[in-house]
Each structure stands twice: as C-alpha cells, then as structure tokens.
Amino acid sequence: MDSAQDVERRHLLLHAAYDAASVRAMERPLLDDNVPLMRMAASATAQVAARMLDDVDVDLDHARVVLLAGAGDNGGDGLFAAAALAEEGAKVTAIAVGRALHDKGFAAFVRAGGKVLVLDPAADIAGCSAGFSAGEAGERLQAAIELAQRAHLIIDAMTGIGLVGPLRGIPATIAASLGMAPHDGDPSAPLPYRAATPNREPSGELPMVLAVDTPSGVGVDDGSLPGPYIPADMTVTFGAMKPCAVLPPATFACGRLELVDFGFDLDSRNPVVTAVGGEQAGEAIRLPHAMDSKYSRGVVGLVTGSARYPGAAVLTVRAASRANTGMVRYLGPERAQNMVLAAVPEAVLGKGHVQSWVVGSGVPEAAALKDGETDIQRETIARLLAHYELAVDATDDDPAYDMPPIVVDAGALDLLPGQVPPQVVVTPHAGELAKLVNRLRGDAPRVDDENADGAALDSAVLDPAGRDEPVSAADVLAEPLRYARLAHDLTGATVLLKGAVTIVVGESDMTLASGVAPAWLGTAGAGDVLAGMLGALLAQYDEDAEGVDADEYADDVASLAAAGAYLHGVAASIASESEQRGWQEPDVFGMTGRHRFNAIGHPIVASDVVKAIPDAIAELLA
Ligand SMILES: NC(=O)C1=CN([C@@H]2O[C@H](COP(=O)(O)OP(=O)(O)OC[C@H]3O[C@@H](n4cnc5c(N)ncnc54)[C@H](OP(=O)(O)O)[C@@H]3O)[C@@H](O)[C@H]2O)[C@@H](O)CC1
Ligand SMILES: [K+]
C-alpha cells in the first residue's frame, strides 16, 4: 500500500509544473550524487522513439530518423538517444543547428555510425568541416530541411529549459520551415491547426515529431509561443513537467506527454501551475451531512438571463440546482421567471438569504444597450456589486470581505468595481478578459500604486507588452497566464479564464488549470452552465461554518473555482461520450500504461452538460 507521501508525490508528478530554475534546483542533489540523469533521459527518449516508429509499423532497420541537435545538454540528450537508435539499425542523421555539439553525446553518436550535418559555417565540431561559404550554408540548410521532411521521425533536441526568448538564427529558420512561425509583425506564433484527437493521439502523418524535454522554441516557464517552434506528436520530459506542458497555448504544441521520473523532491519547490485532478476536484464537493437541511447545504442566488436572453436564466438555474446545492433563488424579468419555473419547479423566485451569487450570464453588457436603454438585471447587479467594492485603504474588516462569494460572468464584467475581495470570481473568456483589462487599466494606478494585496504595481505589470495599445483577445490567447495574472492584480478578484485549458489565478501564488473538457464543449450556453455550477460549489462552503479555516478561505475560492471547471469538463465528457481533452496528464515512463479508450464522442448542447452534472459528481466521489 502506498503511503500518503507517495500518493501526494504522485499527484505532484502528474499535475504540477515547475519553472526551469526549480527543475535545475531539484536536479542538483541528484547530479551531486552522480546519478546519470542524461543517460536516463536519453535511454527513455530512444525507447519512446522506437515505440512511435513501431506504432506506425516502421522497423528500426528501415527507419529514417533526423535529430535536430542544439549545442546544449538538450542536444546531448538527443545525441545519446540517437546513438542508441543507430545501434539498433536506424539510419540517423544529426543536424547540428548550433556551433557545437555535446562532446560525449557526439562521440557516442559517431561511434554508433550516425552521420552529422553541420549548418553553421562558424561551428567548431571535431572532425566536421566548417568555414564553408554562405552559398554552401544555404544549400546545407535546404538539404537538412528536405532530409527532415522525408524522415519517419524528427527528434527535436535544439533547446530545452536553456532557451532564452524566442528561437533565433539557424534553429529559428529550421523551426519556421518544419513547424510554425509568427506572421510578419505578429509577435506570437500561431497554434498547430489540427483536429482534437482522443488522448492526444498522434495523427499518424509523417514525419512524426518527438520533442526532447520541451518542443524547442516554446515559452518554457509561461506556456507562450514567442516565436517559431515545431509542434510535437509526443514530448518526453524529464524530472518534472515544465509550465509549457500544462499552460496554453504551448501545451497544444507538446502532443502527448511522457514523463521520466528522476525521483525529484517535488515538495521542495513551488509549482508555477498545477492541473486539477479528479481527486482534488472531488474534495471540493461537500457531502451532505446527516442533519442537513436545504439551507445548510447552501443556497445560490442568481441574477442571470434577461428579456433579451432568457435562455441563460434557465441554463444557470438548472446547472446550479443540479450541482450539489440545497436551493436556488432566481431574480429576473417576468418572462425569464416563467421559463425558469417551467424548467425547474424547485426554484424560488425573489430575494432572500443566499450563500453565493451568480450574476451576469445572459445579461447584455453596457455596449450592447441602445442609447438610453436600461436593463433591470444590470441595475440589480450594479447595486449588489457595490457591496463588494473595497475602500481605497481597505483593512481586513472591510465589510466587502463579509459578502458571500459571487460569480461575475459575461454581461456583469463591465460592472465589476476596481478593487474587490478574492471571493469575487470573474469568469471571462479571452475577449472578455481583454475588455476587462482595458477598462481597468484606463483608470488604473500607475507606478508605485498598490493592488488589493498591497503589492506595488509597476508599469510592467499594468502594461506587460510595454505598449499602450489596448489588449486584444488574440493577446490574451497568446499569453493567457500573463493576462489572467494582470486581471487579478488589477481587481483582486479570483480570475477564471475560460478556454480549452481553463486557468484560475487567485490570491495564492499558485495558478490552477483544468483541461479535462472535450472540444465539443465549445458551444452556446456552456459558459452559463459553468457559472451556475460555480455558484453551487461556492455556496456549499460558508466561511463562518465549523471546519472552514478563514485564512485558507481565499485559496479555497480558487480551488473551488478550478474544481468547478473540472466538474464542468467531466460532465461534458460524459455528455459527449468523448475521451478527447484539452489537456491530458502525462504517462510516466516505464509504468504500465493505463488502458485507454479512444472514443471521439459526439456533439452536445449545453443542456446535455446540465443533465450529466449529477453523474459527473458521482464519478468524482467514487
Ligand atoms: N542538467 C542536467 O543534468 C540535465 C539536463 N537535461 C537536459 O538538458 C537541458 C538543459 O540543457 P542546457 O542547460 O544546456 O540548455 P539547452 O536547453 O540545451 O539550451 C541551451 C542551448 O540553446 C541555445 N539557445 C538558447 N536560447 C536560444 C535562442 N533563443 N535561440 C537559439 N538558440 C538558443 C543555446 O545557444 P547559445 O545561446 O549558447 O548560443 C544553447 O546551445 C534540459 O532541457 C534537458 O533536456 C537532461 O539531460 C537531464 C539532466
Ligand atoms: K527540445
């Protein structure tokens, strides 16, 4: 039986991602003990490569493999792996993209009969000719690209955790030719364009790409795509996941993840981001107590839907009432009230005591109203949100902190006050987050001012791109972590940025992510369902109740929000009968693989997700 410590370590191994500095710190004690990490990394890489070739029925004897080898240790991993494949009979060519090659890796590769093609005329690699003309350099580059395009497998070992900034020079040219590159004047590279497959199954198209540690060129620590990179079918990563393995958009360039467990002391460092797992999400569900009543199980109040979009009222109320809550109260225009009652006779109309609020889904934003037009829902929401506004010099006993948790969605986002406590959960998608940031930045404090946590906001935080232009939805999609953090810093709210991988940034330094949902969930009303579910999960916990630690409450809000996103994703998986996910936890190298189902599933509507919520809860509690 595994000890609690083993269980906790396994959770971190499969879900937590650490920045490059932390990975190096966790490697240190092992290197000091002469643990042969590079040999372990290379051996795993070679075995994964052989498995990929076998999966497409290519014998090693007939396999054409191209290694893209950088000058650092990432290239070293690749060279030792390539040597092992050459020894097994594969025809392997190493393309040296830098000015040097890892000495011992190079020697092993040459001993195994591998060939080397040097691209940089200024390279200094023993036994390889250099100093060739610019014309010959161009020919060599072209030959290298053609060789790679004709290969069965490309092993990408140009850069790993040693990458600084976007790829430059020859590696950049290679990545742009074989993979994806920014368009002119656009700072970020586009995403790989391919269908979402179950279990991130490789497409089977040749050449396949195996990335060593990280796909070269992706933003290792922040998950961005700052320049050219080569999308991988598989990434074999060492010691621990890096943020690029979990965070969008880089995670979509990693393909399937295989993690080589070096035995790092994962507890010794704080992860940058942690993906929510089923167990963690299950813990967010409060089991009914023997003495519970509808009130003690939590009451959700909803100010959602409008005369224009009454359907959102129905979806949010149905979702909240199915997501482990005692009762829901609904406030809204008469037509929406009637529709709510028809769909959920259990709902109670009108005001009353609640343990959480959900506001804004299906409510028009100000910009959508005609001149002079008012919306009754917006007026109610504005009055409610005023209670959440923190005084400029707020102390711990500011009354805003005593308000129940509130989910601020869609049309209510433009009513959010500047500074709010962390039990305010905002749920924008990329476009809405861009608008929120632009609005708040307009009247935001500049250098030396403070945010809700009392931390100084510098102009780099306010304007991370170092420019005054408005933030666009594309900017947020390109750097979701950065902008979710910015929105949290500007508002103090817990920020849940919706996407194929949803990101939650709250009071603690740790970012949470949930990518369990299938791509089928991108459908009208899915956000309304999430808002209702979040309201329900937040209503279960009363800060003042016995057993709830007030100090941990703020962290709990982020955890509950992330658990809500996870539960929403599981419900969508059940509804669509799909094994496809935005993010999949890694396989651990050498452990017998889990049995994988490969169901692509089928399209769904948001109402299907609502129906599946109880089964999703049962699955998490099982
Ligand atoms: N430590 C260990 O024991 C273990 C480490 N392991 C492995 O080592 C990897 C880390 O190795 P590392 O530290 O040597 O860095 P690495 O990722 O090879 O990058 C450096 C190279 O990239 C280049 N380069 C950088 N930026 C660039 C740019 N923008 N554009 C273009 N080029 C750029 C840079 O060139 P330079 O700037 O020097 O000209 C240099 O050549 C790690 O990911 C894992 O795979 C495993 O074996 C396990 C044990
Ligand atoms: K790499």
Image: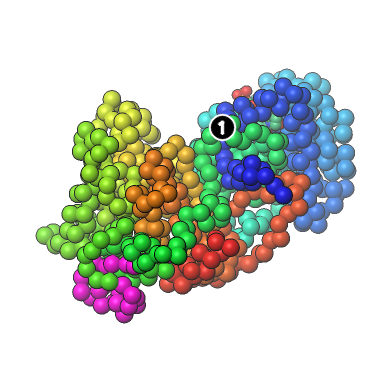
| Residue that lies at the very extreme toward the bottom in this rendered image | 342
Which of the pair 346/269 is nearer the observer?
A: 346
Which of the pair 318/154 is nearer the observer?
A: 318
The image's colour scheme reads rainbow
Classify 10 Å Cα crowding around label 1: few (below 14), some (14-19), many (20 and above): some
- Percent coordinates x, y for residue 523 in the rendering: 43, 65
Say whether residue 374 is left or right of residue 45: left
**Relative to 106, is 590 above or below?**
below
Does the magenta segment cover residue 438? no
- Percent coordinates x, y for residue 29 in the rendering: 68, 25
**Relative to 185, is 252 above or below?**
below
- Tell me which corner region of the image, top left, top right, bottom left or bottom right, holds residue 265: top right
Instruction: Determine which residue is flagged by label 1.
Output: 269
- Percent coordinates x, y for residue 232 in the rendering: 64, 46
Say whether residue 582 is left or right of residue 385: right
Query: What residue is at 88 percent from the left and 30 percent from the top?
Result: 111
Label 1 secondary element = loop
In magenta, the rendered stretch is: 324-347
- Tell me which corner region of the image, top left, top right, bottom left or bottom right, holds residue 355: bottom left
Query: What residue is at 24 percent from the left and 71 percent from the top?
Result: 349
Q: Is residue 25 visible?
A: yes
Q: Quadrant of ligand 1?
A: top right
Q: Quadrant of the C terminus?
A: bottom right
Which of the pair 91/373 is nearer the observer?
A: 373
Query: What residue is at 63 percent from the left and 38 percent from the top?
Result: 240
Which of the pair 300/425 is nearer the observer?
A: 300
| Residue that lies at the very extreme toward the front in this rendered image | 291
Query: What residue is at 30 percent from the left and 34 percent from the top?
Result: 451
- Percent coordinates x, y for residue 109 in the rendering: 82, 31
- Tell me which corner region of the image, top left, top right, bottom left or bottom right, holds residue 81: top right
Does the magenta segment cover residue 340? yes
What residue type is disc 1 on? Arg
